[in-house]
Image: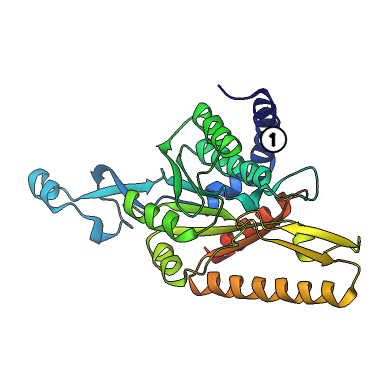
Amino acid sequence: MIPRDILKKIRRIEIRTRRAVHDVFGGRYHSVFKGQGMEFQEVREYVPGDDIRSIDWNVTARTGNPHVKKFTEERELTVMLLVDISASNLFGSTAQLKRDLAAELAAVLAFSAITNHDRVGLILFSDRVEKHIPPAKGPTHVLRVISEVLNARPVSPRTDLAPALRYLNQVVRRRCVAFLISDFIAPDCDRLLRTTARRHDLVSLIIGDKHEHALPAVGLVDFQDAETGRRLWLDTSHAPTRRALLTRQAERRTRLLAQLARANSDAIELHAGERYDRELVRFFRRREQRR
């Protein structure tokens, strides 16, 4: 049974994301993510201007009149959501945890997909695959996806992208749109990212919190790594310490963006407690321009 507080979160996310999908993302999603091929529709008589390469010679020979094959775009897509549920995503310096933002993004993308009659699947991961929900359609399925993200209790607290990417490539044979939602505080996996991006349309959503990048000056603070349990006392009032941390985070961000660029994966950076719609719209516009 789903706890009452999780049900309330699911309901709030459903209301917010349905409105966003209807007002902003639905049409853009449709124009950016199209089918992966062409589907045969019918044979009709040739008319001037038709491409002669589409002539169906068997029907033409049988009827004595030239006929052409007519194709339509194969519209249905499979959308896979790969969501990081490791312990570092339980951090949040605002009312919203990184895990909550991940669930809301998953909801926006899932509702956009089913609005366009696409199937949605889910892979929850830490440093292993924690759960897999096969692709399906319908609003009830999307609500289950949101619930699974919010209610997940991972076996491992650590993060590793490689098992989730490897699993995706094994279980989804046809090309899909794969949204990788994570804080990317994980070991590098350049080669597997590149392999996945060749097989699928890989979009990386980098989840963060503003206080992970710029610490406020609040004196001596006891920090604990959520994934390793390691503790560290840090004097946040010491300006050189804050600058060193800022530099370290900037270097990590630069390495990550370079890694995703090498893999040919689009990257979207988002922060808990802040609006995400503008960044998603900016992403959709970039994709539309490339098409």
Which residue is at a point 37% across and 46% down the rendered structure image? 74
Secondary element at image label 1 = helix
Which residue is at a point 91% across and 68% down the rendered structure image? 237
Instruction: Tell me: 196 left or right of 188.
Output: left
Q: Is residue 278 above or below residue 120?
A: below
> Picture quarter containing residue 282?
bottom right
**Residue matched to label 1:** 19
Instruction: Tell me: 64 left or right of 262.
Output: left
Residue 69 x/y as whole percent:
25, 49
Q: Amino acid at mark 1?
A: Arg
Instruction: State which quarter of the image contains the N terminus.
Output: top right
Q: Is residue 286 above or below residue 87?
A: below
> Picture quarter containing residue 103?
top right
- Name the one closer to the observer, 135 or 186: 186
Instruction: Tell me: 84 left or right of 254.
Output: left
Which residue is at a point 64% across and 40% down the rendered structure image? 21
Instruction: Give the mark count.
Output: 1
Residue 256 x/y as whole percent:
59, 70
Which residue is at a point 91% across and 64% down the rendered structure image? 217
Sort mark 1 into few (<14), some (14-19) or many (20+) by Cα contacts within 10 Å: some
- Name the one closer to the observer, 233 or 79: 233
- Name the one closer to the observer, 223 or 72: 223
Residue 176 x/y as whole percent:
41, 52
- Name the one closer to the observer, 169 or 88: 88
Q: Is residue 228 above or below residue 120?
A: below
Colour logic? rainbow
Residue 191 x/y as whole percent:
42, 71
